[in-house]
Image (cartoon, rainbow, N blue to C red):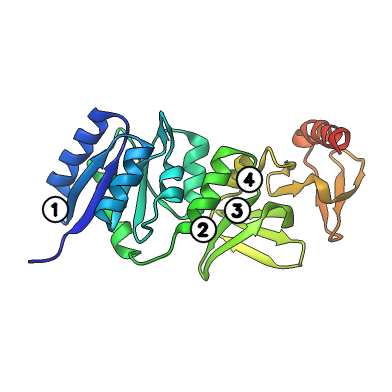
Amino acid sequence: MEKKIRTVLIDDEKNSLIILQKLIETHTPQIEVVATAQSVEQGIKTIEENEPELVFLDISMPDGDGFEVVEKAEFKNYQVIFSTAYDHFAIRAFEVSALHYILKPVKQEDLIEAVNRFESTKGEDITERISVLSNVLKETPSKLILPTSNGMHIINVEEIVRCESSNNYTTFYLLDKKRIVVSKSIQIYEQLLEKSNFCRIHNKHLVNLKYIKKYVKGRGGYVILNDDSQIDVSDGRKKNFLDKLSEFAIKS
């Protein structure tokens, strides 16, 4: 008999636990639910007692959040499928962190897809990725994960000079002259970085206000950045850009 995947479910909502467990029993027979928990404290204890391979983990709980469970549990040799209510910002954060998640209310096709992804990535160390995701979701992010064809690049947001869009790809230009290309649209990063002194000045360009050397007036005008790149400001984005630039100058 094939060995089943030892799994723990952690969610403060009892109905959510019951529904998820029934979906797992019906649609993912390779999973064995060995225990459930309904709080951060119980979750930590349950993981340490059962040493699972996989944990379905709710992000938001009354006594804390799912990231505390990952951080504080001494047993670390498992992977996580996060569950979260729909939140546009959160979903984009998950997408760029290359971590598994399912949306509430859970649908059978989403569950099956998440489990299949887990099985294809078993054995990966995701601790650092979870740490970065927590940072992105809780506050103005100081780091980002850039998933590329060559693996995961964890970069400091401060290192990003600008981002350039090309169809569904985004190129990151960094302070050290490196370029990193990811197969995600620039809209995702615009939302993740909007509180970090970044501004979309053109459909193709997102720039770090910190690295603008000069703004040259014109219909839209253009900016010159620290790396000497010259980027057009579109006419439709000019007002928002100048407002943000003024706010940034005042804060600085």
Q: Determine whether the residue tagged by mark 2 lies in a helix, strand or loop.
A: helix
- Residue 187: image location, x then y, percent: 59, 44
Residue that carries the numbered disc 4 in the rendered image: 141
Is residue 160 visible to the viewer in this orientation of the structure? no
**Alpha carbon separation for disc pair 3 and 4:** 7 Å
Q: Which residue is mark 2?
A: 128
Sequence order check: which comes first, mark 2 or mark 1?
A: 1
Residue identifier under label 3: 144
Callout 2–callout 1 Cβ contact below 8 Å: no
The kind of residue on which mark 3 rests is: Leu
Q: 128 or 157: which is nearer to us?
A: 128
- Precedes in sequence: disc 2 or disc 4: 2
Against 74, residue 245 (above or below) is above
Rendered-image quadrant of the C terminus: top right
| Eye-nearest disc, 2 or 1 | 2
Judge the density around disc 3: few (<14), some (14-19), many (≥20) Cα neighbours within 10 Å.
Answer: many
Report the side of 154 relative to 72 (left or right): right
Coordinates of residue 67 in the picture (x, y in percent): 46, 44
Q: Residues within 10 Å of mark 1 (few under 14, many from 20)?
A: few
Alpha carbon distance from label 2 to label 4: 14 Å
Tell which residue pokes out farthest to the bottom in this image.
150
Distance, label 2 to label 1, CA atoms, is 30 Å
Residue in front for this viewpoint, 22 or 190: 22
User: What amino acid type should be assigned to the residue bearing mark 1?
Assistant: Pro
Tell me, yes or no, whether the two marked residues, 3 and 4, touch with CB atoms within 8 Å.
Answer: yes
CA gap, disc 3 and disc 1: 35 Å
Q: Earlier in the sequence, mark 4 or mark 1?
A: 1
The alpha-carbon separation of the residues under discs 2 and 3 comes to 11 Å
Sequence order check: which comes first, mark 3 or mark 1? 1
Q: Which mark is residue 158?
A: none
What's the residue at 41%, 45% (across, down)? 69
Packing grade of label 4 (10 A; few <14, some 14-19, many >=20) is: many
